[in-house]
Structures are given as C-alpha cells and as structure tokens.
Amino acid sequence: MITIKQSCLIVLMCAAMIACKKNYLEVSPRDRVGDDVVWASAANADLFLNDIYNQMPDINNETEHLDQYTDNSDVGVTWMQGYSNIRTANVTPSNLPRGPWDMWYWGKENNNDSKTGNYEKIRKCNLFIEKVTASTLPDDYKTERIAEVRFLRALFYHWLWMAYGGVPVITKTLDNITQGDSIYIPRSTEEETCQFITNELGEIAQILPLKQADPGRPTKGAALTLKGWCELYEASPLRNSGNAASPAGDLEKWKKASATNKAVIDLGMYDLYPDFRTLFLKTANNSLESIFARQYMPGKGGQLEGKEGPTIINGTEMAWGNFQPTQELVDEFSMANGKAINESGSGYDPQNPYANREKRFYQTILFNGCEWQGDTIKTVVGLGRSTENEIDLGYSSDVTHTGYYACKRLDESILGSDNRANSTSYQNYMFFRYAEVLLSFAEAENEVNGPTPDVLAAVNKVRTRDNNLPTVEATYGTVSQDKMREIIHRERRVELSFEDKRWWDVLRWKIADKMADGTPGVLNRPEVSMVITSNNGTLVYTRTNVSNRIFLPKMYYMPIPQHVLDRNYKIREQSGGKDGWVSGQNPGY
C-alpha cells in the first residue's frame, strides 16, 4: 500500500498534468497525456493524491509563524511580513502577506511565480475528483479517496475564506482554450462561501471513517472539527455582529458551532494527552488528542528547533530564536491557584513574576533563570550579548527582543544548529487537536446558554490536564456568562499559543483595532517586553514598550490581490451587497 508519507515518484508527471499554460485557471493540452497510466491503478492515483497532501502548509519548516502577526510573539526581524506588513499596517492589494507557508496565498501572479497558491491546489483537487470519478478504479476506492480530496479542498478554501471573505467557488477544472472567458468566476459572498465549505464537510463526514489505517488522512472527526471551526468563525462578532437586543448576534450560528463541536466530543474517539509538554513531540505523534496533522518522518523532517529555538546555548548561537513570547502573552498565564495575575488573591509578585505560575507557563515559556539543554537562560541587561541572551531592544541580532523564548513544541534533545542543517524534527504539526474542540464547544455553548455544566466540564478538562489548574468552580465559585467568556478566551490564548490560532481568534472576536469599550485593540497597542536589570545583585523587572503596532479596521480582511482583479473582470463587476465590495475589492482598500 502506498501511504501519504511515501515519496511521490511521478511528481513531474503529475505536475505536467496540471500545468497551466497562461494562468492558474488554464489547462495545457498536455494534461491529457498519460491518463491511461495515472488513473489506471489505485497506486498511481494515490501518488497524485500524495502530491495534494504535500501542498498543506509545511509549518515545521516555516521561519515565520502566525503568532508573530499577533500580540503573542515578536516578529524577530524587521523584514518578516508580521513586521513589514501587519505591524505597520502596510497591507495593499499589491503588497499583502501570504501567511505562513503561503497559507492564504490566492494563486500564481505570473508564469514565473514559483509559489503554489490555493487555487492551484484546489485545481489539483478538482482534477483528481473528475479523473477518479470517470476512471475504472474500484467503487470503494473512489468513495474513500474522493471524500479525502473534498476535505483537502475544503481545507484550502477555509484559509481563503477566513483571509478574504467571499471567494470564487470553483469545483471543476477550467480550460480557457475550450471555454474562453467563461473560466472567470465571480466571488461568492462570504456567507455563500462558508455554506459551501460547511456543506461539503457535513457530507463527507458521513463518508469518512472514524479511524484511518494510514495516519494523516482525514477522518469523520477531522471533517466535523473543521466544520465546527468554520461555524465558530462565522458565529463570532466579526461576521455575526450583535446589537442591543441580541449582543451575541444570531444565536442560530452559535448553536450550529456548538452542535458540531459537541458531535466531535460525542464520537468518543479523542481525549487529551496526559502530558502537555510532550504532547507536541514525536513520541506523541498521532495520539488520541491529534485530530488532523501533517505527518513528518526521517528523511522529510522539519527545522523547528533551529528556526524557533533559543538563540544562545552554552555560549554558542544554536538557533534563530523566532519563538519570542511577548509580555502580554506571559501575563495571560494564570497563577498556580487558577487566578489571573491581576485578580484579587492571585498572589502575583511583579518583582518575582515567574514564581507560582500555572504548569503550562513552565511548559511553554523560557525566561531568565530557567534551564534549557544544560544551560541557564540569562536575559539580564549587562551580561554581554556575545555569550548570553541579553534582551536586544533594537533588532540588531537574533537574540530575543522581548526577554523570552518559548519551548513549546520544541524537542530539548535536538540541537538547533544540527536541526537547521539536517531537518531532524519529526514531530507532526497538528492543524486541529481535541483541546481546541473542547474550548470551541464551550465558547459557542456559553454564548447560547451561558456557563452550563457541559461548558464547565469542557473548560475544566483542559484546565486540569496534568494537574495544571484547579477547576473554574474551585477558583471562582459560580461564574456569569461574561466571566466564563473571559476565562475561555484566556484559555484559548494560553492553551493554543504558538499553534497559529491567535491571529484568527483576534480577528473573529474583532478585538484587533479596538475593544468593545472603545479602547485600543490588542493589535493597536505597543508591544511590551520585560527588561531585567541588576541593582547590587537584586533583579529589577521593568515592563517596557519596545515597538508600536498599527491595525486598521480594513485589515480584518486581506485585500483581493491586484493581479486577480486585473485578470478577472467578473470580480471587478461586483460592488455593494452585504459584504460592501467596491469593484470586487474588500472595503477600505
């Protein structure tokens, strides 16, 4: 059996079959050559499918993770998109970020563009579906594999939809040679695009198995999880604005998100891994907590430790230090007694800020005085940047800009320098895991019915993993719906930090530009770092604003790329409507 981990020996042939003569919507006549070979056997068809799996974002080899677009992590260097585009509000139709590993990249700008956009990936999915449907392959193969490809197509569409709102929904291969201008498809509305994605996922959830023999293929739970996430995004304030009569907006949207995430829970197929620290390492690959993950293996590993790990270890630069937690994120970790640091009775000491924090803090953050790979992390000003990790407030080196590094998802046994050279990280990258489902269910259900026993049970399961925190009730007693919402938001930020979730949460909660009370939003505030100095041997901790952030209201949506507008007259003809487009473009651009 050929698995999705095996090498794609006919990638060049597959590439020729999907080659575009003029742009990503066009088909060269050569793509009919070799059909009798490629679609004649399940083994060969699987090689084509494996190439589609390989199009998923390769995050464990990415230099810039999505948390760097947010208030969770510093960007590290000024040339990265999180700084040069997002933080400076330099987002235009001709200059927009593509997301980590081109996560929401629309499509090739020209024939010289070496990057693969989502519409090229979607076209591969459509081609597979058409060719396999028309083939003489066994019916059971057709049923299973087409469902997998529909999942992958929905996955690619959901990144486009979150980034741009409504996009053209294309479910068949297009050929300008035979179809002419009819290949140009207008944008579906944001709601129509969401409906397409969730309908697809609802249908294939009835086809996909509960468990796959080959890890990495989507299951029924994966389809429902992606569906529930899209429904949660659609129910959230960005796309479901409330009013005085209904502050949460349309409650039916929240009910859908609650029901779908509850359906994942009720499958009984998933559970939390007992050890949060090792959950992300290769020893826990495909654990009961993992719902859908990109698979890594020897010979095709990742460079996670070398790109994201702490910079100076034992006096030698080992890594690039791209995991740089902000003080804002550090402040979100609770105290060991379960309370937030700013709450009465928390016991937080600003001049001993790392004492008595919750367990996830020590499993996620590297701070001054902690141990890593047999060395002590030292960020105190004045110790000398050549041999230590003294905070770098000026972006002149790879050393931390915030006073922190992160250890979450990093394998302490792997040296960063070796990892960069040899791709020695083999832990999977989880796009979705069970803890997120629990928190997504709790969030949606809380908006519908408040902090019910089911909501509390879901949140408590996450909080109490590995004796991390006491339950919500043990910490606060009875809580209101508003307090429960605050707790869930904090839990999501801490639990899912450095998993590329914060950006989407900040957008969907619509807290990037301003808060509900009119104060600056979380991405319109200066970034805060911790500067530590020594006063006759006593450490002094000073919170310091180190760089500004600007987030404009229009940036809740990315602009439609200029080359797309130039090429597609059907999109340029679209104006007005609920989405407020102007000549096909999102408002404000």
Image (cartoon, rainbow, N blue to C red):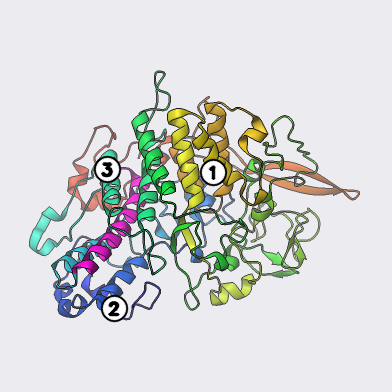
Query: Which residue type does callout 1 highlight?
Result: Arg
Q: Are marks 1 and 3 in contact (CB under 8 Å)?
A: no
Position of 232 relative to 500 (above/below): above
Q: Residue furthest top?
A: 245
Mark 2, other Cα within 10 Å: few <14 / some 14–19 / many ≥20: few
Mark 1 residue element:
helix
Position of 486 relative to 409 (above/below): above
Picture quadrant of residue 123: bottom left
Query: Which residue type does callout 2 highlight?
Result: Leu
Query: Measuring 58% from the left and 37% from the top, which residue is drawn there?
Result: 525
In the image, 126: left or right of 369? left
Q: Quadrant of the N terminus?
A: bottom left
Judging depth in this view, the residue of 324 and 573 nearest the camera is 324
The x, y position of residue 152, in whole percent, is: 32, 59
Q: CA distance from mark 2 to mark 1?
A: 42 Å
The residue that disc 1 covers is 492
Q: Nearer the viewer, mark 2 or mark 1?
A: 1
The x, y position of residue 401, in whole percent, is: 66, 53
Magenta run includes residue 147: yes
The residue that disc 2 covers is 12
The residue that disc 3 covers is 195
| Residue 413's disc number | none
Q: Which residues are magenta?
A: 139-166
Mark 3, other Cα within 10 Å: few <14 / some 14–19 / many ≥20: some
Position of 453 relative to 357 (above/below): above
Lower sequence index among marks 1 and 3: 3
The x, y position of residue 222, in whole percent, is: 38, 55
Judging depth in this view, the residue of 130 and 481 nearest the camera is 481
Q: CA distance from mark 3 to mark 2?
A: 35 Å
Query: Which residue type does callout 3 highlight?
Result: Gln
Q: Are marks 3 and 2 in contact (CB under 8 Å)?
A: no
Lower sequence index among marks 2 and 1: 2
